[in-house]
Image (tube, rainbow, N blue to C red):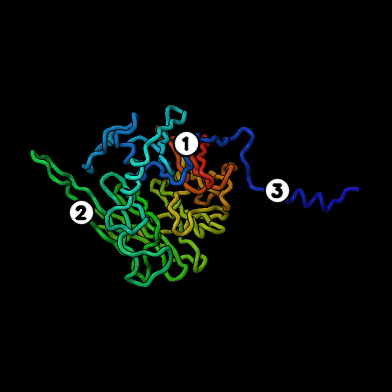
Amino acid sequence: MFDRRAVLAALVALHALPVLAAEDGPRVEPVTLPFAVKAMRGPGSDVALSVATSGLLPIARAPASADPKATASTVPPSVVVVWGEGGGAVLSLDGDRLRTTLIGAEAIEGFAAAETPRGAVPGSRRALDGPLSAYLTGPTRALGGAPGQGAVLTLRERQPLGVTAEPKAVPVTTHTLAPGDDRVFAGRTPRITRLDGRPAVAAVTAQGAAGSGLALAAKGKDGAWTVAAQTPPQVGKAPEGAPLALAGLADFIGAGQPQIAAIRAPDGEGVLQLWRFADGTLSLSGEGPGYAGPAAGEEADLAAPVPRSGRPPDLALPVTGRGALAVVAFKGGSPEERLRIPLPAPAAHGVAVLDAGGVARKILVGLADGRLVAVPAP
């Protein structure tokens, strides 16, 4: 006779299994490279922009103008850059196919070194968007720090040069901001977006031994930068826990303004959150557990928006344990998993999306064993 309790237990266990890719869903495709991947940068990063406008690639266009009024025709193509010992590679799209262009070790070392500007926190990276760059300067800690010991957010904006008959340096204005209220900026790369047509920067803060939150800096109509809003600090794991991780900035709910996707406790039982800015306040729209982000001191970008045609973008990121890639939508502000794709090794070096015409085509994942894999965007 069969054990009915055992059958019931088996059915419950099957129901609790994580969502897997459907039989006709996207499949992981290995990307053949002559080196093991140790670092990865996605579209919009300092390294990817530098490579795309360097002339090393046949797809590269003219470099973006220093004039902040430059048109969209100067925007470089979407590329992902990976590298390891002995060389690097640039991944781009040729139609729906993935194109791989190898580049030398010396070139990639130069591009990687340039993403940490002079005076920036050692090991940190800057964010770039047209004439604006944002990065951390001064001492910093991944968590905590007494007042005066934290980094400040430095914003540099190139100004129009105007018509001149002689070579002149491009004028640059510099702004520095501190979060205040016994907070410091945590060692996370800031992200640049736009609110009401003006630039804004999202950054991670830390307070005390384990508190972590978000700060949103915005440029006013008068051209002045201020910390427009901050979230309450959220308690993580002390003392070794990682601060909040920025997962993506995009209009995930179709509200006409970007929202901030972040991961609380990214190196543990990560909770994916969506924060919305309105009326001078950051409010939590929704959250869901079971997702991973970079640990404290880890540079990898482990999440990326997945643009879709005519609909709000999704978000691609690893699940807890990093053994699978999830594609998440934010219906009503709360995360709703659309797809889960098992990976042959844990995600480690990055998640990036290549798009064409504003529609995602490939999701690339750098794995812990040095391999790079691609998934057709759903």
Q: Please indicate whether residue 224 sits to the left or right of residue 14 in the image.
A: left
10 Å crowding of disc 2: few (<14), some (14-19), many (20+): few
Quadrant assignment, res 297:
bottom left
Image coordinates for residue 251, horizontal then vertical, percent: 42, 46
Q: Position of residue 57 (x, y in %)?
A: 34, 32
Q: Secondary structure at mark 2?
A: strand
Q: Which mark is residue 8?
A: none
Q: How many marks?
A: 3
Marks 3 and 2, Cα distance to the nearest angstrom?
57 Å
Q: Residue at x 28, y 35 (%)?
A: 74
Amino acid carrying mark 3 in the image: His
Which residue is pictured at 43% across the width and 37% down the height?
A: 354
The residue that label 2 is drawn on is 173
Left or right, 43 with respect to 346, comes to left
Residue extending farthest top: 95
Q: Which mark is residue 15?
A: 3
Q: Find out whether the residues at labels 3 and 2 contact each other: C-beta distance under 8 Å.
A: no
Q: Residue at x 55, y 54 (%)?
A: 288
| Residue position for label 1 | 34
Instruction: Residue type at mark 1: give it.
Output: Pro
From the viewer's perspective, is the residue at label 3 or at label 1 nearer? 1
